[in-house]
Amino acid sequence: MNQMVKAPGTALAAAHAAQAAGADEEKQYLTFTLGTEMFSLDILCIKEIIWYAGLTEVPMMPACIRGVINLRGAVVPVMDLSARFGRASTPVGKSTCIVITEVETADGAERQNMGIVVDAVQAVLEIPSAEIEPAPSFGAKIRSDFIEGIAKVNGKFVIVLDVQRVLSADEIGAMGHAAALAELAPA
Protein backbone atom coordinates (compact mmCIF):
# COMPACT_ATOMS: atom_id res chain seq x y z
CA MET A 1 0.00 0.00 0.00
CA ASN A 2 2.93 2.38 0.44
CA GLN A 3 4.12 2.25 -3.14
CA MET A 4 5.17 5.42 -5.00
CA VAL A 5 5.03 5.32 -8.79
CA LYS A 6 5.72 8.05 -11.30
CA ALA A 7 3.13 8.10 -14.06
CA PRO A 8 4.78 7.97 -17.46
CA GLY A 9 3.99 10.79 -19.84
CA THR A 10 5.08 11.57 -23.34
CA ALA A 11 8.07 13.85 -23.69
CA LEU A 12 6.18 15.91 -26.25
CA ALA A 13 3.18 16.48 -23.96
CA ALA A 14 5.51 17.38 -21.08
CA ALA A 15 7.44 19.80 -23.26
CA HIS A 16 4.24 21.52 -24.43
CA ALA A 17 2.93 21.77 -20.88
CA ALA A 18 6.26 23.12 -19.61
CA GLN A 19 6.23 25.78 -22.33
CA ALA A 20 2.61 26.74 -21.62
CA ALA A 21 2.85 26.86 -17.83
CA GLY A 22 6.53 27.57 -17.33
CA ALA A 23 6.91 24.29 -15.44
CA ASP A 24 4.92 21.07 -15.39
CA GLU A 25 3.24 20.77 -11.99
CA GLU A 26 2.98 17.25 -10.60
CA LYS A 27 0.53 16.30 -7.89
CA GLN A 28 0.34 13.11 -5.92
CA TYR A 29 -2.77 10.97 -6.00
CA LEU A 30 -3.79 7.89 -4.03
CA THR A 31 -5.20 5.32 -6.44
CA PHE A 32 -7.74 2.69 -5.44
CA THR A 33 -10.20 0.33 -7.05
CA LEU A 34 -13.95 -0.01 -6.94
CA GLY A 35 -14.89 -3.14 -8.81
CA THR A 36 -12.78 -3.14 -11.97
CA GLU A 37 -12.33 0.64 -12.21
CA MET A 38 -9.46 2.69 -10.84
CA PHE A 39 -10.07 6.01 -9.09
CA SER A 40 -7.82 8.51 -7.36
CA LEU A 41 -7.94 11.29 -4.80
CA ASP A 42 -5.49 14.13 -4.23
CA ILE A 43 -3.13 12.89 -1.52
CA LEU A 44 -3.43 16.22 0.34
CA CYS A 45 -6.99 15.39 1.44
CA ILE A 46 -6.07 11.95 2.81
CA LYS A 47 -5.20 11.51 6.47
CA GLU A 48 -4.72 7.74 6.68
CA ILE A 49 -5.76 4.32 5.42
CA ILE A 50 -7.11 1.65 7.76
CA TRP A 51 -8.38 -1.91 7.30
CA TYR A 52 -12.15 -2.33 7.25
CA ALA A 53 -13.31 -3.17 10.81
CA GLY A 54 -15.30 -1.94 13.79
CA LEU A 55 -18.14 -0.27 11.89
CA THR A 56 -21.31 0.71 13.77
CA GLU A 57 -24.48 1.12 11.70
CA VAL A 58 -26.59 4.22 12.30
CA PRO A 59 -30.35 4.13 11.62
CA MET A 60 -32.06 6.43 9.09
CA MET A 61 -28.90 7.21 7.15
CA PRO A 62 -28.68 7.34 3.37
CA ALA A 63 -27.83 4.02 1.70
CA CYS A 64 -24.32 5.24 0.90
CA ILE A 65 -23.43 5.78 4.58
CA ARG A 66 -22.29 2.46 6.01
CA GLY A 67 -22.05 3.76 9.57
CA VAL A 68 -19.44 5.27 11.87
CA ILE A 69 -16.10 4.21 13.31
CA ASN A 70 -14.21 5.23 16.42
CA LEU A 71 -10.92 6.68 15.25
CA ARG A 72 -8.82 7.43 18.33
CA GLY A 73 -11.83 8.74 20.23
CA ALA A 74 -13.42 10.64 17.33
CA VAL A 75 -16.62 9.51 15.60
CA VAL A 76 -15.99 9.34 11.86
CA PRO A 77 -18.80 8.67 9.33
CA VAL A 78 -17.96 6.05 6.69
CA MET A 79 -19.33 6.23 3.15
CA ASP A 80 -19.57 3.35 0.69
CA LEU A 81 -18.24 5.02 -2.44
CA SER A 82 -19.80 2.42 -4.75
CA ALA A 83 -23.24 3.09 -3.24
CA ARG A 84 -22.61 6.85 -3.54
CA PHE A 85 -22.11 6.29 -7.26
CA GLY A 86 -25.45 4.44 -7.50
CA ARG A 87 -23.91 0.97 -7.68
CA ALA A 88 -24.21 -2.07 -5.43
CA SER A 89 -22.48 -1.79 -2.06
CA THR A 90 -18.84 -2.75 -1.91
CA PRO A 91 -18.52 -6.33 -0.65
CA VAL A 92 -16.07 -6.63 2.23
CA GLY A 93 -13.03 -8.69 1.26
CA LYS A 94 -9.44 -9.22 2.36
CA SER A 95 -8.20 -5.98 0.79
CA THR A 96 -11.17 -3.74 1.65
CA CYS A 97 -9.96 -0.50 3.25
CA ILE A 98 -11.35 2.68 4.71
CA VAL A 99 -9.58 5.77 3.41
CA ILE A 100 -9.86 8.56 5.97
CA THR A 101 -10.19 11.91 4.22
CA GLU A 102 -10.45 15.47 5.46
CA VAL A 103 -13.04 17.69 3.75
CA GLU A 104 -14.37 21.17 4.32
CA THR A 105 -17.76 21.59 5.96
CA ALA A 106 -20.57 23.21 3.97
CA ASP A 107 -19.75 26.69 5.28
CA GLY A 108 -16.03 26.20 4.62
CA ALA A 109 -15.15 27.28 8.16
CA GLU A 110 -14.12 23.85 9.46
CA ARG A 111 -12.69 20.57 8.28
CA GLN A 112 -14.31 17.19 8.94
CA ASN A 113 -12.97 13.65 8.73
CA MET A 114 -14.88 11.16 6.63
CA GLY A 115 -14.03 7.58 5.73
CA ILE A 116 -14.68 6.02 2.36
CA VAL A 117 -14.86 2.27 1.72
CA VAL A 118 -12.80 1.09 -1.25
CA ASP A 119 -12.12 -2.40 -2.63
CA ALA A 120 -8.35 -2.00 -2.51
CA VAL A 121 -5.73 0.74 -2.30
CA GLN A 122 -3.24 0.57 -5.18
CA ALA A 123 -0.42 3.14 -5.02
CA VAL A 124 0.48 6.79 -4.73
CA LEU A 125 1.13 8.22 -8.19
CA GLU A 126 2.74 11.47 -9.26
CA ILE A 127 0.70 12.65 -12.22
CA PRO A 128 1.65 15.78 -14.17
CA SER A 129 -1.29 18.17 -14.48
CA ALA A 130 -0.79 18.14 -18.27
CA GLU A 131 -1.64 14.40 -18.22
CA ILE A 132 -5.08 14.98 -16.65
CA GLU A 133 -7.88 15.59 -19.11
CA PRO A 134 -11.05 17.50 -18.11
CA ALA A 135 -14.07 15.53 -16.91
CA PRO A 136 -16.08 14.09 -19.81
CA SER A 137 -19.62 15.26 -20.37
CA PHE A 138 -20.77 11.69 -21.06
CA GLY A 139 -19.57 8.11 -21.00
CA ALA A 140 -18.66 7.78 -17.30
CA LYS A 141 -20.77 5.65 -15.00
CA ILE A 142 -20.72 8.34 -12.30
CA ARG A 143 -21.89 11.93 -12.21
CA SER A 144 -19.50 14.14 -14.14
CA ASP A 145 -19.52 16.79 -11.39
CA PHE A 146 -17.80 14.22 -9.13
CA ILE A 147 -14.90 13.99 -11.59
CA GLU A 148 -12.00 16.42 -11.48
CA GLY A 149 -10.42 14.82 -14.52
CA ILE A 150 -9.20 11.61 -16.12
CA ALA A 151 -5.56 10.55 -16.37
CA LYS A 152 -4.09 7.77 -18.45
CA VAL A 153 -1.51 5.80 -16.47
CA ASN A 154 0.24 2.71 -17.86
CA GLY A 155 -2.41 2.34 -20.55
CA LYS A 156 -5.37 2.53 -18.13
CA PHE A 157 -7.71 5.37 -17.29
CA VAL A 158 -7.68 6.66 -13.73
CA ILE A 159 -10.67 8.77 -12.71
CA VAL A 160 -9.54 11.68 -10.54
CA LEU A 161 -12.36 12.44 -8.10
CA ASP A 162 -13.29 15.85 -6.70
CA VAL A 163 -13.39 14.96 -3.00
CA GLN A 164 -15.36 18.07 -2.00
CA ARG A 165 -18.21 17.17 -4.35
CA VAL A 166 -18.21 13.41 -3.75
CA LEU A 167 -18.25 13.91 0.03
CA SER A 168 -20.46 17.04 0.04
CA ALA A 169 -21.95 17.36 3.53
CA ASP A 170 -24.97 19.30 2.19
CA GLU A 171 -25.90 16.65 -0.37
CA ILE A 172 -25.33 13.75 2.04
CA GLY A 173 -27.40 15.56 4.68
CA ALA A 174 -30.25 15.99 2.20
CA MET A 175 -30.06 12.26 1.34
CA GLY A 176 -30.14 11.43 5.07
CA HIS A 177 -33.21 13.60 5.56
CA ALA A 178 -34.96 11.87 2.65
CA ALA A 179 -33.99 8.43 4.03
CA ALA A 180 -35.36 9.32 7.48
CA LEU A 181 -38.64 10.53 5.98
CA ALA A 182 -38.94 7.35 3.92
CA GLU A 183 -38.42 5.16 7.02
CA LEU A 184 -40.99 7.12 9.01
CA ALA A 185 -43.65 7.12 6.27
CA PRO A 186 -46.56 4.72 6.82
CA ALA A 187 -46.37 1.61 4.68
Image (cartoon, grey):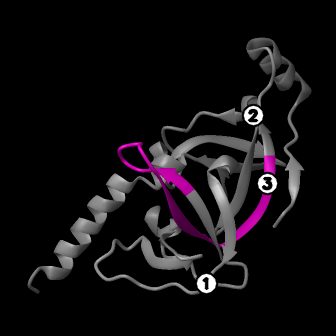
Q: Amino acid at mark 1?
A: Val
**Disc 1 + disc 3, Cβ < 8 Å:** no
Q: Position of residue 94 (x, y in %)?
A: 72, 85
**Local crowd at mark 2 within 10 Å, few (<14), some, or many (≥20)?**
many
Q: As rendered, which of 56 and 122 lies closer to the eye?
A: 56
Q: In which quadrant of the rendered image does the C terminus lie?
A: bottom left
Q: Report which residue position mark 1 lands on.
A: 92
Residue at image coords 78%, 40%: 127
Q: Is residue 60 left or right of residue 35?
A: left
Tell me, yes or no, if residue 37 can be seen here: no
Counting residues from the start of the chain, the first of labels 3 and 2 encountered is: 3
* Image mark for residue 131: 2
**Disc 3 + disc 2, Cβ < 8 Å:** no
Residue at image coords 56%, 87%: 54
Q: Report which residue position mark 3 lands on.
A: 124
Give the structural element (helix, strand or loop) at label 1.
Answer: loop
Question: How much space separates mark 2 and mark 1, taking CA atoms?
Answer: 33 Å
187 to 159, vertically: above or below: below
Q: Is residue 37 left or right of residue 183?
A: right
Q: Does the magenta-highlighted stretch encompass residue 180?
A: no
Counting residues from the start of the chain, the first of labels 1 and 3 encountered is: 1
Give the structural element (helix, strand or loop) at label 3.
Answer: strand
**Local crowd at mark 1 within 10 Å, few (<14), some, or many (≥20)?**
few
* Image mark for residue 42: none
Question: How much space separates mark 1 and mark 3, taking CA atoms?
Answer: 22 Å
Q: Position of residue 70 (x, y in %)?
A: 53, 79
In magenta, the rendered stretch is 102-125
Q: Amino acid at mark 3?
A: Val
Q: Nearer the viewer, mark 1 or mark 3?
A: 3
147 to 19, vertically: above or below: below
For the stretch drawn in magenta, the main secondary structure is: strand
Q: Amino acid at mark 2?
A: Glu
